[in-house]
């Protein structure tokens, strides 16, 4: 018995042990008391206890299904598996049914037949209910029976079940099942959106279509809103609006821009708070893009935000906006620049807004504008202006491309010839082709000797070549013709900043400080940086 009931681990003698009497009870099919069950657990006889519970269940099933005359109660008996199937109202195989008959368990077999009869009646009712009578296989083993049971239990059909129904031509059954599924979904949506007083529960209702769309888009169309208002279903509108507002907030948090229709919706629904957040985040992103994080005003009403938006849209700036950029200073954050640029360009440690990426963007927009104007009008003054802006946008190659093949003999106005040549010479200077730059400057002087621009260019070229006395001469000639001395200083500063050879940089700085230490005091910072780099 110890082996049969898996109690071999127990080593006590049978005379003094509770185990012997427990196993006798199990062998006779009797139930254990609670104290006996506790004793088995206390002695680690868990498998024995499990068998005891199975014996108990077996005995109960024998009583329920009129099989008590069958003496064996051990769980491995075929009757136990048969009775468990009857408990679940599962069909028996032919061999199982025959086993009952062979063991003269006729009442148990009769119970099985009754169960089968009930199921057959139920199957017939389901075939009627779900229009599946055309299916010829009426046996309970037919795949149709569990499918109809699923439909009746309000379970959604799987893809394989739908495919099987299609293969059997039971399309009406599929339609009914899908309508029931949609009805359940409609009921769930009505509960979710607090629709408690709308009587139409049909999935063909327009309300169902609205709620389904709302699940995916979060936004109601005008017709949907009118439908809901007429039926006083304003709670749905409120929920939908809140969902859509949350969607727009999430879009903003991800750094995406709102489009015009989204902003218009927020205005119409009095959600200016979200518009303000969107603008503030957009402003912050633009400040990062254009390297002006040091500008402290975070308000979306700032003029800088308007200007950056225009630059982003490649729109031209107004004169008042340009003047504001020129007048407004900014403390530039060191973290926004490379260490090299911070060291090499000390003027960026505190500068005007009209510099850096804003400067480049502005002049790029202007250059494109004047190019388009030239294409539209043919007026070559637009070429001169475009060329000048391309240079300021740090794209001298674009300026040179524009002024190729000038055909000066076909241009009547000397002032225009001089302007074009001066701009072209400046572009050559930008790419270190100083000989070509000088040729352009001298031709420009011949065409317009009274203009200070080509003289300024000649002065800059001379300084680039470290011919300082020549440079001073040309700058003085430029001043005589109306040039601003500050413009000369700007050209000299550019020479110092762009010097690639540290020794040459030091040479020009020492020349300037010796000439006028106060006027050229700014050069000391470059001299100091050069020394630091040398160390």
Image (cartoon, rainbow, N blue to C red):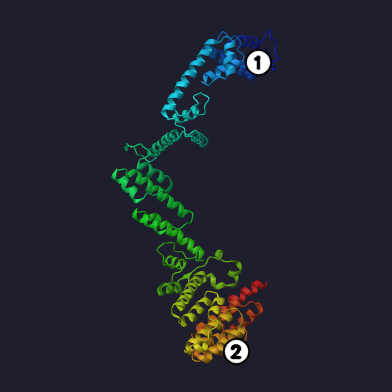
Residue 303, position as x, y percentages in the image: 41, 67
Q: CA distance from mark 2 to mark 1?
A: 116 Å
Q: Which residue is mark 1?
A: 5
Classify the position of the N terminus by image quarter: top right
Question: Number of numbered discs present?
Answer: 2
> Looking at the image, is 49 positioned above or below residue 190?
above
**In the image, what residue occupies the spot 43% across and 74% down?**
323
Q: Which residue is mark 2?
A: 469
Residue 7, position as x, y percentages in the image: 67, 16
Q: Is residue 206 left or right of residue 168?
A: left
Q: Nearer the viewer, residue 519 or 7?
A: 7
> How packed is label 1: few (under 14 Cα within 10 Å), some, or many (20 or more)?
some
Q: Nearer the viewer, residue 65 or 52?
A: 65
Residue 35, position as x, y percentages in the image: 58, 14
Mark 2 or mark 1, earlier in chain? 1
- Whether residue 53 is visible: no
Q: Secondary structure at mark 1?
A: loop
Q: Nearer the viewer, residue 346 or 95?
A: 95
**In the image, what residue occupies the spot 70% across and 10% down?**
13
Residue 108, position as x, y percentages in the image: 53, 12
Q: Quadrant of residue 72?
A: top right
Q: Quadrant of residue 517?
A: bottom right
Q: Nearer the viewer, residue 7 or 336?
A: 7
> How packed is label 2: few (under 14 Cα within 10 Å), some, or many (20 or more)?
few
């Amino acid at each position: 018995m110890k082996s049969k009931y898996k109690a071999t681990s127990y080593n006590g003698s049978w005379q003094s042990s509770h185990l012997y009497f427990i196993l006798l009870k199990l062998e006779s099919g009797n139930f254990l008391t609670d104290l006996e069950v506790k004793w088995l657990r206390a002695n680690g006889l868990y498998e024995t206890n499990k068998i005891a519970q199975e014996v108990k269940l077996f005995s109960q099933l024998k009583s329920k299904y009129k099989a008590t005359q069958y003496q064996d109660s051990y769980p491995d008996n075929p009757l136990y598996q048969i009775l468990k199937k009857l408990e679940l109202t599962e069909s028996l195989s032919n061999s199982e049914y025959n086993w009952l008959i062979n063991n003269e368990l006729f009442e148990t077999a009769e119970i099985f037949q009754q169960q089968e009869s009930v199921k057959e009646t139920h199957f017939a009712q389901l075939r009627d209910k779900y229009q599946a009578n055309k299916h010829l296989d009426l046996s309970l083993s037919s795949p149709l029976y569990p499918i109809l049971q699923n439909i009746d239990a309000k379970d959604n059909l799987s893809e394989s079940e739908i495919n099987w129904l299609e293969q059997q031509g039971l399309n009406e059954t599929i339609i009914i099942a899908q309508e029931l599924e949609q009805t359940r979904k409609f009921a769930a949506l009505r509960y979710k959106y607090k629709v408690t007083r709308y009587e139409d529960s049909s999935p063909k209702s327009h309300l169902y279509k609205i709620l389904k769309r709302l699940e995916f888009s979060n936004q109601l169309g005008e017709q949907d809103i009118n439908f809901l208002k007429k039926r006083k279903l304003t709670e749905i509108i409120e929920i939908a609006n809140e969902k859509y507002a949350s969607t727009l907030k999430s879009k903003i948090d991800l750094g995406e821009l709102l489009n015009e229709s989204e902003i218009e919706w927020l205005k119409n629904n009095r959600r200016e708070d979200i518009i303000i957040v969107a603008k503030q985040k957009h402003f912050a992103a633009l400040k990062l893009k254009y390297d002006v994080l040091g500008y402290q005003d975070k308000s979306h009403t700032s003029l800088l935000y308007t200007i950056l938006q225009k630059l982003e849209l490649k729109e031209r700036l107004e004169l008042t906006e340009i003047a504001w950029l020129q007048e407004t200073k900014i403390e530039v954050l060191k973290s926004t620049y490379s260490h090299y640029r911070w060291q090499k360009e000390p003027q960026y440690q505190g500068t005007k807004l009209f510099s850096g990426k804003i400067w480049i963007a502005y002049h790029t927009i202007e250059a494109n504008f004047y190019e388009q104007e030239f294409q539209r009008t043919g007026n070559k003054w637009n070429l001169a202006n475009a060329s000048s802006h391309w240079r300021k946008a740090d794209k001298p190659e674009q300026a040179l491309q524009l002024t190729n093949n000038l055909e000066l003999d076909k241009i009547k106005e000397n002032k225009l010839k001089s302007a074009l040549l001066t701009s072209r010479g400046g572009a050559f200077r930008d790419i270190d082709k100083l000989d070509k730059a000088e040729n352009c400057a001298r031709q420009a002087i011949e065409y317009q000797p009274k203009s200070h621009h080509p003289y300024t260019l000649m002065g800059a070229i001379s300084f680039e070549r470290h011919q300082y006395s020549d440079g001073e001469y040309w700058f003085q000639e430029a001043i005589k013709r109306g040039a601003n001395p500050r413009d000369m200083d700007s050209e000299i500063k550019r020479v110092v900043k762009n010097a690639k050879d540290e020794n040459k940089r030091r040479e020009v700085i020492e020349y300037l400080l010796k000439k006028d230490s106060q006027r050229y005091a700014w050069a000391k910072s470059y001299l100091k940086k050069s020394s630091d780099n040398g160390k």
